[in-house]
Image (tube, helix red, strand yellow):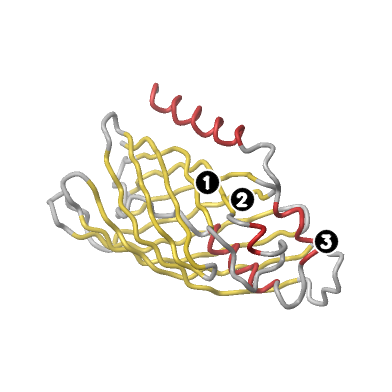
Amino acid sequence: MKNLKFLILFAVLFLALNANAKKPYDDFAANVTNENIEYFAKDLAGLVGSGTYTTGRVLGWGGFQVGPRAAVVFKLNEKDTALGDPDKVGHLVMPWIQADIGMPWRIDGFIRAGSFEGLTMAGGGFRWGILRPVENEFSFQTMIVVSGHSVVANSFSGAHYGANLVLSMTMKHFTPYVGGGMDAMHLSVKDSTSALKDEDVKTYSPRYTAGINFKLPAYLDLSLAANYAEYGLGAEGSFTLRF
């Protein structure tokens, strides 16, 4: 219980420190065009789809995990000017709280939600372990991850769907993992001051992840990973309670 209270306080402090930060999504209505909306939808899909498999393994029946997570895009695609000049927009961050539970037949379910810089995200999904998990050192685990999310901002809303294949290897103190998959985004424009002809766009884009999960004392977990998607390089991390 003490660890859970610490994780909740950590998440609240993170959001409070950034409460007055500039909201880049507020510039969407003034900058979105038919030329850049597709690139924005792909960049957004890569950001929202991150962080769905931070352990690299299924939890197993009765397992539980909860805590704050976050993903960051270091710089938008150079053709994604829907929020303004990518050099001036800089990085985008999406923090959220996620809860995962292990179920029978090597299936995990998870839900997550977050709101930051004018963007709200909510969703969840499932992970299925193709191979039966074992705790022997240097043993492999493969799994399939599917997810779905809704995203809402002042000037747009979207539906995201993702599917990934993940491979991890158990080691004594940590678990390295790699994964790759596809993000689909259906983006709907609600407000635009530009001459935008098409108000909806559907995109499909790949995303690749390589990371390490550390099992810390007191049932704490730390995961750090790098992502590569349409925007180029990004990152994700989580600090959770798992048992």
Report which quarter residue 168 is drawn in.
bottom left
Q: Position of residue 187 (x, y in %)?
A: 68, 66
Label 3: state its secondary structure.
Answer: loop
Disc 2 to disc 1, C-alpha distance:
8 Å
- Provide the residue designation for mark 3: 191
- Of the residues shown, which amino acid type is indicated by label 2? Met
Label 2: state its secondary structure.
Answer: strand
First of labels 3, 1 by sequence position: 1
Q: Position of residue 81 (x, y in %)?
A: 70, 68
Q: Are marks 2 and 1 in contact (CB under 8 Å)?
A: yes
Q: How many marks?
A: 3
Q: Is 130 left or right of 149, judged from the image as shown?
A: left
Spot the residue most to the front. 87
- Of the residues shown, which amino acid type is indicated by label 3? Asp
Disc 3 to disc 2, C-alpha distance:
19 Å
Q: Is 60 left or right of 16, judged from the image as shown?
A: left
Disc 3 to disc 1, C-alpha distance:
27 Å
Mark 2 neighbour class, 10 Å CA radius: few under 14, some 14 to 19, many 20 or more: many
Q: Position of residue 175 (x, y in %)?
A: 25, 51
Mark 1 neighbour class, 10 Å CA radius: few under 14, some 14 to 19, many 20 or more: many
- Provide the residue designation for mark 1: 112
Which part of the image, by quadrant, shows the C terminus? top left
- Please name which of the two marks, 3 or 1, marks the residue nearer to the observer: 3
First of labels 3, 2 by sequence position: 2
Is 1 drawn above or below residue 240 in the view shown?
A: above
Q: Which mark is residue 121?
A: 2
Q: Are marks 3 and 2 in contact (CB under 8 Å)?
A: no
Is 232 drawn above or below residue 73 in the view shown?
A: below
Which of 232/164 is in front? 232
Which part of the image, by quadrant, shows the N terminus? top left
Q: Which mark is residue 40?
A: none
First of labels 2, 1 by sequence position: 1
